[in-house]
Image (tube, coloured by chain):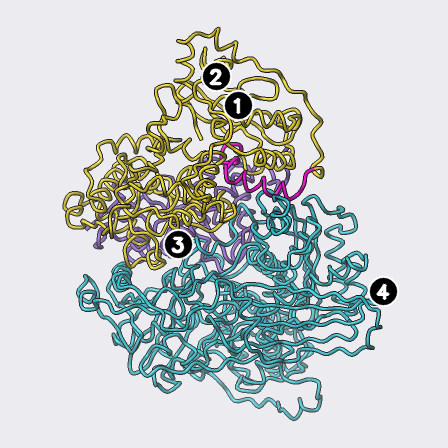
Chain colours: A yellow, B cyan, C purple
Amino acid sequence: MTRGGALAVGIVFVCAAGAVAAIAFAWHPAIDEITPPAPGSFDRYLVAEGEDLANLGNCAGCHTSEPSRPLAGGRALDTPFGKVFATNITPQADDGIGAWSSEAFGRAMRRGIARDGRQLYPAFPYDHFTHATDHQIAALYAWLMTRRPIAGRAPEPQLAGIFAFRPLVAAWNLLYLDEGPLPTDGSRPSQWNRGRVLAEGLGHCSGCHTPRDRFGAEDVARAYDGAWTEGWYAPPLNAHSPAVQPWTPEELQTYLHTGLAPHHAAAAGPMASVTRALAQVPEEDVRAIAVYISSLMADAPASKQDKPQPVDRLAVAQQQHPEAATLYAGACATCHDPGAPMMQQGRPVLSWATPLHEASPHDTVRVIMQGLTPPGGSSGPTMPAYADMLSDQQVQDLAAYLRTRFTDKPAWSDVPAAVAEARK
Amino acid sequence: MSTPRNALGRRAFLANALVVTFASSRHALAQDQDKKLPQSLARTPELDAWIRVGADGTITVFTGKAELGQGIRTALTQVAAHELAVSPGQIDLVTADTARTPDEGVTAGSHSMQDSGTAILNAAANVRALLAEAASWQFAIAPSRIEMRDGAAHAPDGRQIGYGDLAASLSLEVEVKLDMPRRHGGKPVIGQNLPRLDIPAKVSGGEAYVQDMRLPGMLHARVVRGPSDGTRVKAADIAAVGKMPGVVKIVRDGAFMAVVADQEWRAVKALNRVQAGGWERPSPPIPAADLRETIHRLPAQDVPIFDYPGPAPPADARSIRVRYSRPHLMHGSIGPSCAMALWENDGMTVWTHSQGVYPLRKALAELLKLDLEKVRCIHVEGSGCYGHNGADDVAADAALAARAVPGSPVRLQWMREQEHGWEPLGSAMVVEMAAELDGNKVASWRHDVWSNTHSTRPRTAGGLLAGGEVDPPFVPPRPGPIPMPEGGGGRNGNPIYALPNAHGVFHFVEQMPVRVSALRGLGAQMNVFAIESFMDELAFATDNDPVAFRLAWLKDERAREVVQRAADRFDWRRRGAGGGGSGTGFAFARYKNLASYCAVAMEVRVDGDSGEIHVPRVVAAVDSGEAVNPDGIRNQIEGGIVQSLSWTTREAVAFDKTHRTSFDWSGYPILRFPSVPGRIDVEVIDRPKQPFLGAGEAAQGPASAALANAVAHALGMRLRDMPLSPERVKAALRPAPVATKQAAG
Amino acid sequence: MITLTVNGQAHQVDVDPDTPLLYVLRNDLELNAAKFGCGLGQCGACTVLLDDKPVFSCLVPVAALGARKVRTLEGLPKTLPAAFEAEQAAQCGYCIAGMIVRAQALLERNPRPTEKEMRTHMAPNLCRCGTHMRILRAVRRAAEAMGGGVREEARIGAEEK
């Protein structure tokens, strides 16, 4: 998850507020180094539990850049003010977290402070992880410390000027870090509460799906209102959900567990990696998350509709975008038309596809150009990338055609920019 | 592809046949009871059915076997060229064609070299002897003084006569004599790495496949079916489809439907239009997402597959009992099945990549209600099939479509999802192994294998998909077990090891929840996987080195040498201790205990985080008898290993209640380049003058077991259910789930 | 009539404009190399070069080509085909044309790929016969013949530390 905006705006605020006060809050003692504990010293059941939690939080999504070097970090997260690199969280003593005691690890998870006392940048979502239970943090620690130690330190953040001054993050923490476990909502079933702890804690769903305020933190007033991440738009998961079909707990559970929702679409972009990790999480945990997140969308338009009918304005689209209609017939219909083999498997029609209903064309354009590729040759929703098959103009036309044909929403205005950005 | 359209009788080739008597009788052969005619020759003993020599010296050799990409065209050409003492370029090899070649049944079971190779070898030796005899008359010297080379007979004084001239003076309308001496001396062709004759066209865009055929006036067709075996399309607006541009005809006969169009893409569009009407499953629901438990549970007919005697084990013998399994597997040809058919002059000609043109002709004749001689099936290469895929079915589909448009050739290719959805699968299998150990010796051995049939190859119209769709439908033949020693589900269930008190039973399950048939190796892959995994488990239980343990029970000298050579080449003695994700594994089998011997040693690294198995190095040794084309054998073994790694690490056909859900490569992933081994090193052991032994299915069983053994060595725990997928590896590395809850609580 | 440029030659074809390039190559221009494998962009049997990039011709409508240039196996230099022949890199061979075209794109862009780059680049193309080892050998051989070469061996499963 990128937290570039959070970081940048937060730091600007801190500058204005005054650095001296920040430094006072920013000082934290180092915690003594330890000799990396022997993997055998951890309870294997706790380790297994930690593995599930690591998948739930998709640690590898950010901390693995090269599959042969799992969790060794190095992945760059672009921010408007420079690059932050995910760190090495293997139990390697010098470059990873091998010398971190469980206390040091717990402090990092709860308060965003590294073992040596430095502030971690909030690109690391400790504002969510702080809600994890002690047992969860212990399990995660056990799992991480039993991974293969890999040498190699992540590059230092490449931030311009004042932004490289870590202690300033402390002020941000003062404002936005709400430490500790979440209170239980007694009016809700326990499954909902469990889902909330998982989603708001280690799952950190809102990290991508909630827009940032002017200080770069998640805007609580607009929680789950949709936000940008790595060039993709993470759609709203609240009453503003653009989904045409309702997100029932069952449908959402299927989506999170398989990356494919029969009445919505296949997961793409950063969410594809999330669903692949969730595929390995016990189903009851995914179910709990689905119960919680779907409850946030109870007031979405789709949930109020009785039986939404798919929009297919074939004639209008054909008339407005005749060339794209031909492109669609030759390049898309073999999978997406009703008689196509994929559709015979009960896959969602394009009329249900959430990206087409979003306010921005970016997700649609990115899916067309980049396709969907399950990693490592595994099975799963697949789509070829059309970036080399179609010209920019053709992708633009196609996106406009799809919008016209499969939604009743107004035409997008910024398609060329979306194509240019995806081409980069 | 210059296949003549008119059926040419084989007599038509004998333009200049003179009648020369050549004594040959079955009586003579019968004197030696041990020397029976090889199967192909017994069925077609006439020499001119195999080899003809034209007046211009061109030599035409006929085989009833088909090139499937296994290199048989090249190897058979070499056999003929060698024995006739000509260069391979002088041979024109005609492959399976019901109007021209002998009936050699089906090209399967690694039989081609054994059957056709042996037949052609004998026929060529006969022809060479006849030509030499004819030359001896002309030179007026003894045949023994004549040297046959480069397509001519040479006398010691320098006189020479070409084969064409010699052939003009004799007839090959005689029966093959079996005990003709093999050619000796001269430049060998057998044993040489002759470059494959079919490769130049394949790397240059030549017409190499039935898919590439274009006949004048050709139409394109697509067959209409539901998404998979057991389903059908619902009624669609057929009239509207008929009005689509380019649609020439909608062919319907009962539930059979095909669309015929002037252009291929238009046929595809028409197909999709029909399919938009949806589909249903009239057949009973599929009982489970993974059918191996179903197969294990269904009523079975018990067929003994072997009984080796031995004393009863002592009362205090240690007993070990384990279970292995594999899911349904797909052939997964890269090119969907295709056929060309032409209905003309009340006769049907079908160009097909079927493995058995003669059985197909019979089934088609029944389907089309035609006399046998009105149907001609000509083999033209297709995409690799690896067993009974859609080849025969699509031939029937094309024939039915062609009959509706007389005089127009019809090219019908299946779509990807039709190949995935309708090809007969390789059956899921379960093997239970049990042994008793007396100290560190095996005292008893028990092998129980459950499976559906391993062949529903069409021999009647009921064996074709279309046969079950036309009105009235043909009844599919009742499946049965293939008898040992070849066996189907029992194939290779009989261990090659000299084990005492060993017994095996094939529990043949007649009821087929989904369509199955022959997949490369039939039951051998599963049985070898089980036997060779179990040998390792017993070696471990008795604290023996796996290779030494095998050698201790292996009496067959050729088998021992193959094992030894693979182990030495791999440097087995210096293998690592295993564990920590790194391991080495070994396995061996002789395919069917009748064909090639193959041993495989493998090194693996298992990534505990991803569960993926990497294979840095594989070494194999193979003994295929006399090696006609060593590089061809190497190619088959390399390919067999890689294909087997794909089966064993990732493949499983998935179902829901209504259909196969593995409808394309995204639902049925196979091995891709990033996952293939670092290197594979194959040693071919040549056995000059020994019978040819097929190699096409020799590696699959040993490769899958070597992988499982290496993974067990790497992890310290054994995976017995295929595929050894990342999910299974990761699950194996985790503590039992019940205990997790206790610990967490 | 639609005009397209294949292997340096302009052609006019009378087909529906949505017809995928693959069908035009095979049926109208009678070029055999590109094969129908899946029609879904999953197997690479139909691979051709479109302005130097390897694409699935089964998914490119012929009307979308415009002035872009198509190259098929038939129009490529003989270095790779000769290397495939020398290595006997085929069994059934159905995938081979697509393999050669994809390899051509790699070596044109980078005549000195690493073993890993080569394997990653070839990943979109499927082979069912298991001829992969020979195909890789053929690409290595062709790279050398072009004055480059595959740089280092793959460290399959090697733990990178």
- Quadrant occupied by the N terminus of chain A: top left
Q: Are marks 1 and 2 in contact (CB under 8 Å)?
A: yes
Q: Measure the alpha-carbon separation of dots 1 and 4.
A: 61 Å
Inspect the image, locate mark 4, and give the three-letter code of the amino acid beneath it. Gly
Q: Nearer the viewer, mark 4 or mark 2?
A: 2
- Residue ID for mark 3: C33
- Above or below residue B505? Residue B212 is above
Inspect the image, locate mark 3, and give the three-letter code of the amino acid beneath it. Ala
- Residue ID for mark 4: B439
- Residue ID for mark 2: A169
Q: Is residue A116 left or right of residue B167?
A: right
Kindly state the secondary structure of the residue where label 4 is placed.
Answer: loop
* Res. B385 in view: yes
Instruction: Specify few, some or many for label 2: CA neighbours under 10 Å numbering under 14, 14-19, or 20 or more.
Output: many
Q: Which mark is residue A73?
A: none
Magenta range is A42-63
Residue B635 picture location, percent across and down: 58, 58
Q: Measure the alpha-carbon separation of dots 4 and 2.
A: 69 Å
The verdict on residue A49 being magenta is yes
Kindly state the secondary structure of the residue where label 2 is placed.
Answer: helix
Residue A42 picture location, percent across and down: 68, 38
Q: Are marks 3 and 4 in contact (CB under 8 Å)?
A: no
- Residue ID for mark 1: A112
Q: Measure the alpha-carbon separation of dots 3 and 4.
A: 62 Å
Count of numbered badges drawn on the protein: 4
